[in-house]
Image (tube, rainbow, N blue to C red):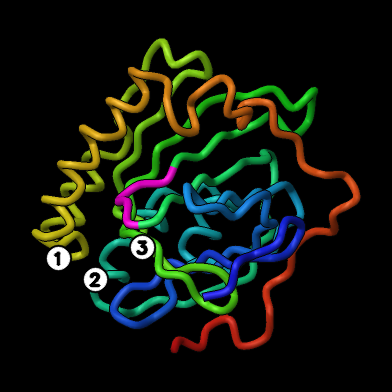
Amino acid sequence: MREFQPGGTAVRRDVFRRKVWSAHALRVVEDTAEALVVGCRPGAESLVPTTWIEWLRMGDETARLRALPNLARGNWQLGQWTWRSTAHLQWVPPDTWFSVNAFFDATGEGQLAHWYVNFQRPMRRTPIGFDTFDLLLDLVVAPDLSRWEWKDEDEYAHGRRLGVVSENDHRAVGRAREEAVAMIGEAVGPFAVDRGLRNWRPEPHWPDPRLPAGVLALD
């Protein structure tokens, strides 16, 4: 599979039962044996479930609650969305059940706001980027790694009841939880100070990434 060049576009698709749940156009920061690192800033193009858009625009909690049952039934619609408010990096290693995201303030001096560990199925590279699937559970970590808290455990449990998170997924997430917490405690990988990810800034001359034609077509 191709190696992505810095500045190029890589599309992250979340795929469930052979159907695209979301697609996000991202800028490649680096592509190494350790991880594919991609960046996002306000203006990046995406396709996301319309229930999510309705929730963000209207603050309608019932719209957000419809998303998981729709996902379990395979019955959802996608709408266009433009990323806003924050810039972030995604550190996506191969054969790993989580990614590490660094979120930055996009309105001020771009300081690191928090780390965000996103539990997901291992990425599968594609000609346009990579496919994965968000497994609903997250870990929010302070910029200095001094504290962290689990997020969306109720949603994760509901996803298990609906069959969105399989038993194989659940066992893998259990192991990944321990791996991620150990990585934070030891300040290694993307969390290492000398790794430099905490100081990332979007390149101002890079145009906003766009989704390619045929983004919903799977191999």
Is 35 or 26 nearer to us in this picture? Answer: 35
Tag 3 residue: 133
How far apart marks 3 and 1 lie (CA) works out to: 14 Å
Q: Amino acid at mark 1?
A: Gly
Contact, CB < 8 Å: mark 2 with mark 1? yes
- Give the residue displayed 38% in from the left and 14% down from the top: 147
Is 194 or 139 nearer to us in this picture? Answer: 194
Q: Amino acid at mark 3?
A: Phe
Contact, CB < 8 Å: mark 3 with mark 1? no
> Of the residues under marks 3 and 1, which one precedes in the sequence?
3
Packing grade of label 2 (10 A; few <14, some 14-19, many >=20) is some
Residue 41: percent from left, percent from top: 72, 47
Tag 1 residue: 163
How far apart marks 2 and 3 lie (CA) works out to: 13 Å
Residue 78: percent from left, percent from top: 52, 74
Q: Which secondary structure lies at badge 2?
A: helix
Image position of 48 with respect to 104: above or below: below
How far apart marks 2 and 1 lie (CA) works out to: 7 Å
Is 11 left, or right, of 122 in this rendering? right
Q: Quadrant of residue 152?
A: top left
Packing grade of label 1 (10 A; few <14, some 14-19, many >=20) is some
Q: Which secondary structure lies at badge 1?
A: loop
Q: Which span is picked out in magenta?
A: 95-99
Is 183 or 24 nearer to us in this picture? Answer: 183
> Of the residues under marks 2 and 3, which one precedes in the sequence?
2
Residue at the far right in the pictured view: 205
- Give the residue displayed 65% in from the left and 58% down from the top: 26
Q: Which secondary structure lies at badge 3?
A: loop
From the image, state whether disc 2 or disc 3 is nearer to you: 3
- Give the residue displayed 68% in from the left and 26% down from the top: 199
Residue 63: percent from left, percent from top: 42, 58
